Image: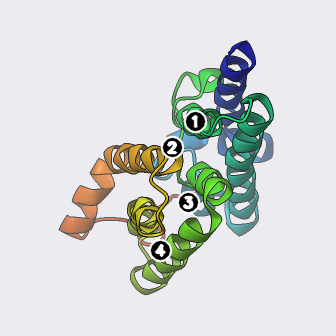
């Protein structure tokens, strides 16, 4: 029991490492949460710092989710719930990082790492559709929502109705709540598109 609790706690602390904040501070001496959309994630890093830093942030945030799941498997004594809970903890840490006054991102990159490790094929199918939607609409937020919506659907269709399904459903609800302002902007046609100049990029 104690190792499992320890795994969830460490996953939260790992998720709390906000790579976009760290990178923006080290490269430009700025708080990225005060620029662009104000979000501490890969998309805002792209707008503010450019492609290279954004790709690095994306990869590191995905790796946080992967690491959390493997930590849960290592210390979870064979439980299916502990890795899933570790994944949730990493996402919560990314969104509300203890090191950065609980102001973080929206957790999609970390969610990708979590779900791809827990259920690779359903996450892959959902990811392909999400990427296609981003290519055609250039709305990253829409693609993110499609990913978290389709992942539990594909899990259910594939007959996976256990902890991974319920955690993915919780992540879906969680993501829609975090993106509620983006949903309103999409409906109103005011959402920033990928590659738009609305991010006040720092030179």
Which mark is first along the chain, 3 or 4? Answer: 3
Q: CA distance from mark 1 to mark 3?
A: 31 Å
Camera-side mark, 2 or 3: 2
Whether the residues at callouts 2 and 1 have beta carbons within 8 Å, the answer is yes
Asked whether, in this view, residue 80 is left or right of residue 29, the answer is left
The image quadrant that residue 50 belongs to is bottom right
Q: Position of residue 27 (x, y in %)?
A: 78, 47
Q: Which residue is mark 3?
A: 43
Which mark is first along the chain, 3 or 2? Answer: 3
Whether the residues at callouts 1 and 3 have beta carbons within 8 Å, the answer is no
Up the image or down, 132 lies above or below 38; here it is below
Q: Nearer the viewer, residue 72 or 186?
A: 72
Farthest top residue in view = 2
Q: Position of residue 150 (x, y in %)?
A: 41, 67
- Label 3 Cα neighbours within 10 Å, binned few <14 / some 14-19 / many ≥20: many
Visible in this render: residue 203?
Answer: no
Q: Which residue lies at the image location 47% right of the left edge and 79% below the top edge?
A: 129
Q: Which residue is mark 2?
A: 163
Which mark is first along the chain, 4 or 2? Answer: 4
Q: Which residue lies at the image location 66% right of the left edge and 38% below the top edge?
A: 18
Which of the numbered marks, if any, corresponds to residue 81? Answer: 1
- Label 4 Cα neighbours within 10 Å, binned few <14 / some 14-19 / many ≥20: many
* Quadrant in the picture for the N terminus: top right
Camera-side mark, 4 or 1: 1
Q: Nearer the viewer, residue 197 or 86?
A: 86
Q: CA distance from mark 4 to mark 1?
A: 27 Å
Q: Nearer the viewer, residue 157 or 40?
A: 157
Q: Nearer the viewer, residue 15 or 192?
A: 15
Q: Which residue is mark 4?
A: 130
Which mark is first along the chain, 1 or 4? Answer: 1
Q: Position of residue 169 (x, y in %)?
A: 39, 49
The image quadrant that residue 51 belongs to is bottom right
């Amino acid at each position: 029991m104690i190792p499992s609790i320890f795994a969830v706690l460490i996953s939260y602390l790992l998720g709390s490492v906000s790579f976009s904040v760290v990178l923006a501070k080290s490269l430009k001496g700025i708080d990225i949460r005060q620029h662009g959309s104000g979000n501490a994630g890969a998309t805002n890093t792209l707008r503010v710092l450019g492609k290279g830093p954004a790709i690095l942030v994306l990869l590191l945030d995905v790796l946080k989710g992967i690491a959390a799941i493997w930590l849960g498997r290592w210390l979870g004594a064979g439980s299916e719930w502990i890795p899933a809970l570790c994944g949730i903890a990493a996402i919560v840490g990314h969104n509300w990082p203890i090191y950065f006054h609980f102001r973080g991102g929206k957790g999609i990159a970390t969610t990708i790492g979590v779900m791809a490790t827990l259920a690779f094929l359903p996450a892959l199918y959902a990811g392909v559709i999400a990427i296609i939607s981003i290519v055609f609409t250039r709305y990253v937020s829409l693609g993110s929502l499609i990913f978290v919506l389709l992942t539990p659907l594909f899990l259910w269709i594939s007959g996976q109705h256990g902890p991974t399904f319920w955690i993915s459903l919780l992540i879906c609800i969680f993501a829609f709540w975090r993106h509620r302002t983006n949903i309103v902007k999409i409906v109103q046609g005011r959402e920033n598109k990928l590659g738009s100049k609305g991010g006040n990029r720092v030179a």
